[in-house]
Amino acid sequence: MALITSTKMFEKAIGSDYAVGAFNVNNMEIIQGIVDAAKEESAPLILQVSAGARKYAKPIYLVKLVEAAMADTGLDIVLHLDHGEDFEICKKCVDDGFTSVMIDGSKYPLEQNIELTKKVVDYAHSKGVVVEAELGKLAGIEDDVNVSSQDATFTDPDQAVEFVERTGVDSLAIAIGTSHGAYKFKGEPRLDFERLKKISKMLPDTALVLHGASTVLPEFVEMCNNYGGKIPGAQGVPEEMLREAAKYNICKINIDTDLRLAMTASIRKMFSENPSEFDPRKYLGPARDAIKEMVQHKIKNVLNASNRL
Ligand code: G3H
Ligand code: 13P
Ligand code: ZN
């Protein structure tokens, strides 16, 4: 087993009806829960690390934990930088042994995004590392979702073609209505499938990526609410929409919020039922189990990625 790039994974997933799960990792229990689920499901796996995760755990710990996870499970894993904000962090991750990096230039005008992405692609490719970029801006719950503001922020299909051609990027994150966190939609959940279909038709060989794709599982929101501070109004992307998106070249589906909710719900429940407990293994162990169960559910029922190795 080894750290691998996502190239072959995406070649298989493109044009299919499944997507690879990309899960954000911050510590040992999260990594163990995810890899044990992927192992049981024989599913391809991307573990991703944000700048915040690098700061929290230190890069070397995360790299070594992922190496341990591969040795323990025999799985090949993609180690990916999530939302790299500049060339320097992408370079650091490439040099640290990551096999995939995301350069997120989505906040810049098109030309600047292309220039920055191309610089990262040139460096990463020279070291055998693949690159994800982002074009368009993810919706925020506070944003007005009227058609004109949507057109201004969602990924423009013509620009996407130009962007991929000029940067040589390996995969492209697109904005079609998802957003990060637990509050994704003001009213009815809605994704712009027409836009997605158009982009996948115009870029038939490019793996597309969906950020902000947690389903915000009601059972965990309810558990969090029952055992502590409330998370009112939480709303995620419906499972059937994600399954549908996988049919149109969404090859990578990013999940972080659902991991946070599963872990927090389990820990809150534990402390509520055992307020005098102070052995960390007694709350981190069940939290790890909750993550494993949730990830297994995702792989089977949302990503449709079981037995795809
Ligand atoms: O897209 C962002 C991920 O959920 C990572 O979040 O920057 O708080 O680690 P973070
Ligand atoms: P969620 O907040 O929906 O889990 O999205 C995570 C993500 O896109 C990480 O890059
Ligand atoms: Zn993201």
Image (spheres, rainbow, N blue to C red):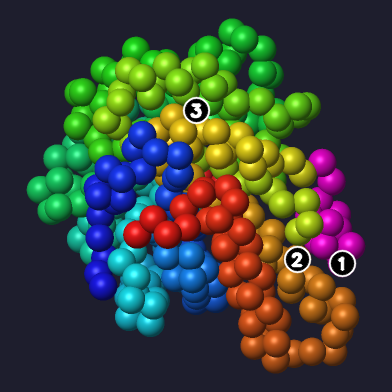
In the picture as drawn, the residue positioned furthest to the top comes out as: 148
Estimate the x, y position of residue 267 in percent, counting from the top left.
74, 73
Q: Amino acid at mark 2?
A: Ala
Estimate the x, y position of residue 140 in percent, counting from the top left.
63, 31
The answer to whether residue 243 of the structure is visible from this angle is yes
Q: Please, what secondary structure does the residue beneath circle 2 have?
A: helix
Q: Residues within 10 Å of mark 2 (few under 14, many from 20)?
A: many
Q: Is residue 119 above or below residue 286?
A: above
Q: Which residue is mark 2?
A: 265
Q: Residues within 10 Å of mark 3 (few under 14, many from 20)?
A: many
Marks 1,2: beta carbons within 8 A: yes
Distance from Cα at disc 1 to Cα at disc 3: 34 Å
Estimate the x, y position of residue 156 in percent, counting from the top left.
42, 16
Q: Amino acid at mark 3?
A: Ala
Q: Which residue is mark 1?
A: 227
Q: Please, what secondary structure does the residue beneath circle 3 have?
A: loop
Estimate the x, y position of residue 41 in percent, counting from the top left.
48, 65
User: Does label 3 point to a residue whose CB lies under 8 Å from ligand 3?
Assistant: no
Residue drawn at point x = 53 percent, y = 12 percent? 151
Part of the protein shown in magenta = 221-233
In the picture, measured across the screen, residue 272 lies left or right of residue 295, that is: right
Q: Which residue is mark 3?
A: 175
